[in-house]
Amino acid sequence: MASLFDWIAAARPKTLGAAIAPVAVGCALAEKISGKLDWTLALCTLGSCGALQIATNFFNDALDSIKGADTQARIGPRRITAAGRANAGTVKIAAWLMLLVATLLAVPLFEARGWPILLIGLPSLYFCFGYTGGPVPLAYRGLGELFVILFFGLVAVTGTAFVQTGEWYEAAVIAGFQIGCLSTVLIAINNLRDVDEDRQTGKKTLAVRLGVGFARAEIVLLIVAAHAAGFYWFTQGWERAFTLPLVTLPIGLFVAWRVLVEPPSRGHNRLLALSGMQLLAFAAMMCWGIVKAREVMP
């Protein structure tokens, strides 16, 4: 029987920054632009996004094991289904329960902003399962990175700002792209680390389709793009939103260097943790920079 520690590990805490970061940045933008922040809506947004992330991780755990993509020999963090700590059916039930939690927490968001929340929420709910399940599982078609940058970047940041203000902002799109790039680094490192196992089991990630060289270049490009896009803030007079996140660049450069020189191995688990740290630190610095910006909407 799976222990509490097993379930916490299955939720993959190192990846939960991908749910926290976009909500924090979206709320900071909304508060700066509108001058107010609804904490009830903010907490419901954070809780719903976190539940979606955990549901995705649970589905991934169960479905990868069913499809044979995870084995006892995996070099990544242990999966409770593949390790025999819980059966796939139980893990899938846990995933559906997390989707229910995400839906319930989204009810206040729908009451506040109406049908656009459905347009955001329904695809998000489906792709938590469709990432590894359904007729076209994104992770098995090399579309995992696109899913993350879209839903845990652009949609999450712009959607969070919309929930707070009822408006869509260009600045939220740029911030969403930046956060999305760093969130995608997490899955790109996962795919690079598991490239040999995925190739053997038929999981056609981008690393499998295009090779280790591409996967390494992709990670470096994502890190660089996240910081380079921040020049937008500089051009809009919000210089600190560009300069403060630069303090996290050394972490990104270290990850990029290790990705380039280290063969795919268990050592990439440490790089995954560092990338999660950079994502959260980057988001925190961006929030600080936004709060300290001059009183002009970008």
Image (cartoon, rainbow, N blue to C red):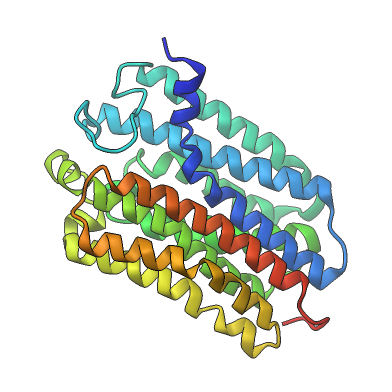
Q: Residue furthest right?
A: 35
**Camera-side residue of 222 and 262:** 262
**In the image, residue 261 above or below residue 131:** below
Give the residue furthest to the left: 200
Which quadrant: the C terminus? bottom right
Q: Residue at x 33, y 56 (%)?
A: 188
Q: Is residue 243 above or below residue 7?
A: below
Provide residue 23's location: percent of width, then percent of height.
66, 55
- Judge from the rendering whether residue 80 lies leftward or rightward of residue 107; answer left or right: left
Question: Can the viewer see residue 213 in this picture?
Answer: yes
Count of numbered marks: 0
Q: Quadrant of the N terminus?
A: top left
Residue 73 in percent (x, y) is at 19, 30
State the image coordinates of residue 181 (x, y, percent, origin top left): 46, 65
Q: Is residue 227 above or below residue 248?
A: below
Q: Is residue 151 visible?
A: no
Q: Nearer the viewer, residue 16 or 274?
A: 274
Left or right, 60 with reference to 44? left
- Please give the name of the residue rendered at 77% of the width and 81% of the height, measured from the top-left corner: 297
Q: Nearer the viewer, residue 113 or 255?
A: 255
Residue at x 39%, y 45% (from the top left corner):
131
Query: Residue 269, located in which quarter of the rendered image?
Result: top left
Q: Place residue 57 in its image quadrant.
A: top left
Q: Position of residue 271 (x, y in %)?
A: 36, 52
On the picture, is 95 further left or further right than 267? right
Residue positioned most to the top: 1
Closer-to-camera residue (93/54): 54
